[in-house]
Image: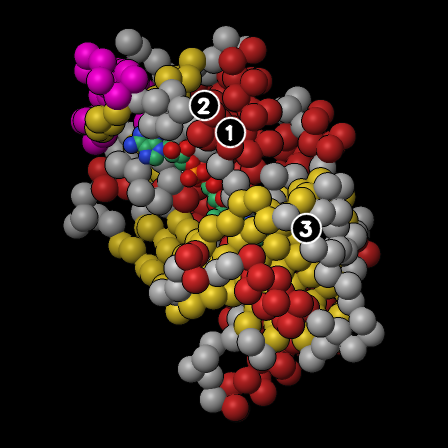
């Protein structure tokens, strides 16, 4: 089999890239190790930056998002039992915080790819990359995990296979520099059958730890709790989750958290990670394959969308004009924005979580930071600008 761009992974990065290339008349084939049902059912991100929403609309895949998504003008930072609203809409000149679940984005993109005749091989096994430092790179895989090994000969390979995929290790270790921070806490996330407790998102810092109130639909809430990095989901009965959420979200003016049946729960670890370079020969990494942020800044999916816009632009310049200048600068263009998102995600995480190793002095600094970003217009503007997404710079 031959294609112009072989894409490994049908997450947001791989699917967006494939459709962006299609819109420019460039062929691609996606291979994905999970089934369609699995990728369309995995609960992950919820918040889309304005740039990601604009991109989806420009690509013609935003119709359902515009109908079913939730458009918020701000969010709340809650500490010392008091809520402080950050008016993102006003502070960023009219932008919105969009809440639309990642698996809905995936459903919309898979449908759009298949409708346009795009090739996606789901449920593949034994994926390997070959000759990435030559002009004829190849991907090998086994269809349906146990079929005969197949080969895709490509001009370029896009490694969109997430943090644990085989693409990043295909860059020799001697070339790769990796930067990492692992946090001593995790997020316990639940889906709850109940109407929203709040119209907008609430990020709460409490003596007992962080809590987050988000939404999915008029009938479903998404709630998160900070737990210890070594904790296990079996330690968290529904009663314990509710008790902790009530404590951490309590306000002096009587906030009411609406309860309902918990129908999904899980724990995700928190890390910051950057791989430099994001390219090697004809292999380009995009999204979680190249970088990870802790979820507090809601940046992961949005960074994946930003990377593939740069990559699609570079590939377009190559195929239409024979130019490789954007492709050559891919790492440099992407990392400039990625490091700022890494900084913001780290900042939000350290400001909002309780680090039990903190001295009383460090706790004082944390509360001062929260007070500052909610009371100074300059600091609130910086927070809002980063939360809504920094501009793309080529
Ligand atoms: P992935 O979504 O990981 O996709 C990679 C794909 O590659 C997967 O489908 C995988 O099955 C496939 N794959 C792996 N190995 C192979 C292989 N060998 N062969 C073929 N395919 C392979 N981000 C935000 O922007 N906003 C948020 O609000 C937000 N909240 C989050 C909340 C939680 C609880 C979590 C866990 C994450 C959150 N994120 C958020 C982060 C976001 O989900 C990720 O950053 C995003 O999924 C990255 O997209 P991706 O396409 O790079 O990688
Ligand atoms: C959600 C996830 C986030 O990481 C975040 O910062 C806000 C909301 C969510 O899943 O809804």
Residue stretch in magenta: 130-158
* Position above or below: 215 against 307: below
Looking at the picture, how far across and down is residue 83, in whole percent?
76, 70
Is residue 305 inside the magenta stretch? no
**Mark 3 crowd level (few <14, some 14–19, many ≥20, 10 Å Cα):** some
Q: Check the image and report above or below for 223 versus 58.
A: below
Q: State the residue at coordinates (64%, 24%).
A: 61
Quarter residue 74 falls in: bottom right
Q: Is residue 149 magenta?
A: yes
> Circle 1 sits on which residue?
40
Q: Nearer the viewer, residue 269 or 275?
A: 269
Q: Is residue 88 left or right of residue 331?
A: right
Q: Is mark 1 within 8 Å of ligand 1?
A: no
Q: Are marks 1 and 2 in contact (CB under 8 Å)?
A: yes
Q: Which residue is mark 3?
A: 260
Give the distance between the C-alpha atoms of the residues marked 3 and 1, in whole angstroms. 24 Å
The nearer-to-camera label among 3 and 1 is 3
| Label 3: which secondary element | loop
Whether residues under marks 3 and 1 lie with C-beta atoms below 8 angstroms apart, the answer is no
Residue 36: mark in rendering: 2
The dot on residue 199 is none
């Amino acid at each position: 089999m031959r294609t112009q761009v072989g894409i490994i992974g049908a997450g947001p990065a791989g699917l967006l890239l494939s459709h962006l290339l299609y819109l420019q008349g460039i062929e691609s084939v996606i291979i994905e190790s999970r089934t369609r049902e699995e990728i369309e059912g995995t609960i992950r991100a919820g918040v889309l930056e304005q740039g990601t929403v604009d991109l989806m609309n420009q690509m013609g895949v935003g119709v359902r998002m515009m109908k079913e998504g939730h458009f918020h003008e701000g969010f709340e930072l809650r500490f010392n039992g008091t809520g402080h609203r950050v008016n993102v809409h006003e502070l960023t000149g009219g932008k919105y915080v969009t809440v639309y679940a990642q698996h809905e984005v995936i459903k919309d993109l898979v449908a759009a790819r298949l409708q346009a005749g795009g090739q996606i091989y789901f449920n593949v096994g034994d994926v390997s990359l070959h000759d990435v430092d030559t002009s004829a790179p190849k991907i090998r895989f086994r269809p349906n995990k146990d079929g005969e090994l197949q080969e895709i000969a490509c001009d370029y390979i896009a490694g969109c296979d997430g943090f644990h995929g085989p693409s990043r290790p295909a860059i020799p270790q001697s070339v790769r520099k990796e930067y990492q921070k692992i946090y001593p806490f995790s997020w316990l996330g639940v889906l709850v059958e109940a109407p929203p407790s709040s119209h907008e998102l609430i990020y709460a810092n409490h003596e007992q730890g962080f809590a987050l109130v988000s939404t999915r639909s008029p009938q479903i809430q998404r709630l998160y709790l900070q737990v210890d990095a070594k904790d296990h989901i079996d330690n968290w009965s529904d009663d314990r989750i509710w008790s902790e959420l009530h404590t951490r979200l309590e306000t002096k003016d009587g906030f009411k958290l609406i309860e309902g049946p918990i129908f999904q729960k899980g724990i995700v670890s928190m890390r910051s990670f950057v791989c430099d370079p994001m390219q090697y020969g004809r292999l380009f990494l995009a999204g979680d394959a190249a970088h990870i942020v802790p979820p507090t800044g809601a940046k992961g999916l949005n960074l994946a969308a930003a990377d593939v816009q740069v990559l699609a632009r570079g590939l377009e310049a190559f195929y239409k004009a024979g130019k490789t200048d954007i492709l050559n600068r891919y790492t440099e263009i992407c990392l400039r924005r990625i490091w700022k998102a890494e900084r913001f995600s780290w900042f939000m995480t350290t400001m909002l979580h309780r680090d039990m190793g903190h001295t009383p002095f460090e706790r004082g600094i944390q509360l001062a930071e929260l007070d500052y970003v909610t009371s100074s217009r300059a600091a609130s503007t910086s927070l809002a600008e980063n939360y809504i997404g920094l501009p793309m710079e080529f």
